[in-house]
Image: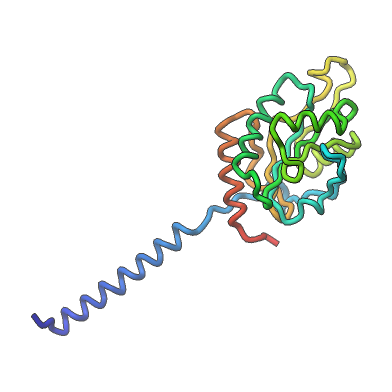
Amino acid sequence: MKMNKTGIFLLAFFIVLTTVFIIVTYDDTKKPDTLPVVGSNTGHKIKPFSFVNQEGATVTEKDIEGKVFVVEYFFTTCKGICPKMNENMSKVYEAFRGNESVKILSHTVDPIKDTIEAMKAYSLRFDADPKQWMFLTGDKKELYDIARYSYLISASDDTATVDIQSDFIHTDRFVLVDRDGYIRGKFYIGTDEGDVNQLIGDIKKLLKEKPLD
C-alpha cells in the first residue's frame, strides 16, 4: 500500500523526533556528576611535602602528581579508631588494587614510635604494595602542618597527658584529592561503611573526570 505525502512526512518527523530524544537521553545519562571542590572559592591545592614510606624511600608530591589519592592520619599502636579506619581503607585499596592512577597516603601522627620498620610491619597486615599504599613517617611538625594546612584536617598532640590513646589526637576523616591536587567531594568518615562506599564511588568519578586546570 502506497503512503500519501502526509503519511511520509509524519513518518519522517517521527523518526527525527525519536533520534533527537535518544541523543538527548544518552548525553544526560553519560554526563558524570561533578564532585565539589573543598576549600576556598578557587579551590584548595595541597602543598609540597617530603616523607619516607615503609620501604625507606622518600615520597614527595611529585610521586603522586597526576594521580587521584586518598589521605588519612593514624598511628600503629592505636587501639581506638585506627584499626577500623585501616580495615575500611583496605576496602578502598582492594577496590583499586593495581590501578596506577590511584594512591593511598597513610600518615603517622607518632613518628617517634612509627619508624620505617614499624610502618613496614604494619603495612604487611594489609599486603600493601608500597608503590600504591604508602605508609608515611617523617618530621613531626611537617606531618602535622600538612594535615592542618594542606588537607584541612586535624593532627596534633596533647603534652598534658602521657596516655598514648589521648596523647595523639587525630581525625577519623579520609581526604580525597584529585589529579590536580584539589580536595574533592567531602571529608569521609573513615569508620563509617557508608561513607567509605561513597568514597570508592567518588574515586571512580574522578578517574573519569578531565583535569580541572
How many tags in the picture? 0
Query: Looking at the image, is 184 positioned above or below residue 21?
Result: above
The answer to whether residue 42 is seen in the rendering is no
Colouring rule applied to residues: rainbow
- Relative to 27, 49 lies left or right: right
Query: Looking at the image, is 82 positioned above or below residue 94?
Result: above
Q: Residue at x 80, y 33 (%)?
A: 120
Residue 22 falls in image quadrant = bottom left
Residue 149 falls in image quadrant = top right
Residue 82 falls in image quadrant = top right
The answer to whether residue 65 is seen in the rendering is yes
Query: Looking at the image, is 204 positioned above or below residue 135?
Result: below
Q: Position of residue 166 (x, y in %)?
A: 80, 19
Query: Looking at the image, is 1 positioned above or below residue 160?
Result: below
Q: Residue at x 58, y 56 (%)?
A: 208
Q: Residue at x 64, y 36 (%)?
A: 188
* Between 5 and 99, the one nearer to me in the picture: 99
Q: Locate the C terminus and report the quarter of the image it occupies.
A: bottom right
Q: Position of residue 195 (x, y in %)?
A: 58, 35
Q: Position of residue 7 (x, y in %)?
A: 16, 79
- Relative to 20, 149 lies left or right: right
* Between 150 and 3, the one nearer to me in the picture: 3
- Relative to 18, 150 lies left or right: right
